[in-house]
Image (spheres, rainbow, N blue to C red):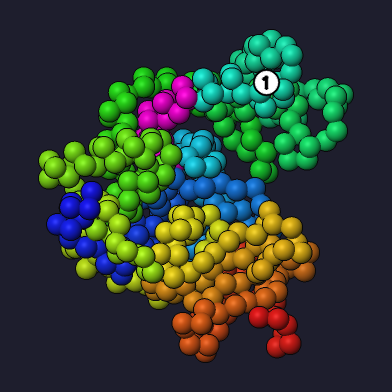
Amino acid sequence: MAGRLCNAETVSVRDARLLLLAGCALDEAPARATKGRVLDLVRALGFIQVDSINSVERAHHLILHARLEGYKPEQLAHHTEVSRAAFEHWTHDASVIRSDWLPWWTHRFERSRARLRQSAWMRERLGRNWRKTLVEVRAALEERGPLATRDFPRPARARPSEGWWDWSPHKAALEFLWRTGEVAVHSRRGFEKVYDLAERVHGAMPNAPARNDLVAWACTAALERLGAATAREIAHFAWAITPMEASAWCAKAAARGEIAQVALERLGRAARPGFARLDWKKAAARVTPDETPRLLAPFDPLIRERARLAKLFDFNYRFEAFVPAAKRVHGYYTMPVLVGERIVSRLDLASDRENGVLRVDRLWHEPSVGARVAAAAARASAERLAGQLGLGLAWPTAGRKR
């Protein structure tokens, strides 16, 4: 590997950053939202992570707010519930995924089926009569149509509540059948999933492609969006293949002249071996980063890989919603501010819906950015998001900690 690295061209930190910005659809000014543009974005990104936390707004909507003007949640729901141009399932986490990628998910369904049947955690939640529960839930969907967990009777609790993971047997059965591809998310009531038989949502389910085809697709789809990356980053784009599979395929593809083998420059570290699109130089040269200040959701595709974020943007970020309050450094829901190709600030904020304002409690500016520039961008980004959410803006007073 060391010899190959010596002979490889180097992708600079800046070129890798520009390629990633373009692949994450953050290189151009936000366009006016329409159903068509929302779908174009889902297809361009490949998938959008779904998250339940609603402190500011749910993450999938924040991801689209960052890239579009005037986006409305019903525009995304149209594609998951009406046109069926997108579906919900898992990548690295729960996501809205472009529907023409469904055939590749058949491998995930098979893997989940094998893993979940052996899962003591899942079997415990399904209960002793787990096979019977699965049959009953499947039959109820077939006979009654789309159903949510609340449409099934909840048995008396046999153990103390476990909060988020306090699943009834019917909830566990629905999740099992969804993870294994037998049922699909039909729609949502608020944020609650409503399930139906997969064939009634997707139509006839596709056959599983060959594993080699899956690996080729996963690597190609990742490099189209990452531009230049390590084999691990390529594998972790959709979490459909292993890093070993990605490394082997990329090495062979580079030998065939289909992609480039490169050295990846990283801030504070030695260059690492990696791979890039063949046109990476021209693609990076075409990028002129847009200067619109925008807040990024904690699960935005630009920042969800924290190690890559640090190495390309010199920005260390931790999502602290699941950190005990006393140990938080920056706050429950802190969002970075992107301007052009720099992250200039981070804001601890929440939507105060009762009072109709987006409340910014604290903010921090990056030391490498001028204080006036960072402050102006932070305020502009908050004003922009508040307007997107239909809220006023409550800015911190001068005496608050920053």
- Residue 192, placed above or below residue 323: above
Answer with left or right where residue 203 lies relative to residue 328: left
Majority secondary structure in the magenta region? helix
Res. 270 visible in picture: yes
Is residue 258 rendered magenta in the image?
no
Residue 345 lies, in percent from the top left, at 54, 75
User: Which residue is more in the foreground, 40 or 156?
Assistant: 156
Q: Residue at x 34, y 71 (%)?
A: 289
Res. 338 visible in picture: no
Residue 400 lies, in percent from the top left, at 73, 83
Q: Which residues are magenta?
A: 97-111
The picture quadrant where one finds residue 22 is bottom left
Residue 366 lies, in percent from the top left, at 52, 78
Which quarter of the rendered picture does the C terminus lie within?
bottom right
Answer with left or right where residue 386 lies relative to residue 180: right
- Residue 261, placed above or below residue 204: below
Is residue 102 rendered magenta in the image?
yes
User: Which residue is more in the foreground, 376 or 251?
Assistant: 251
Which residue bears the numbered disc 1? 123
Q: Residue at x 57, y 72 (%)?
A: 346
User: Which residue is more in the foreground, 129 or 1?
Assistant: 1
Answer with left or right where residue 95 lies relative to residue 274: right
The picture quadrant where one finds residue 127 is top right
Give the amino acid at mark 1: Arg
Task: Spot the residue most to the front.
Answer: 2
Element under label 1? helix
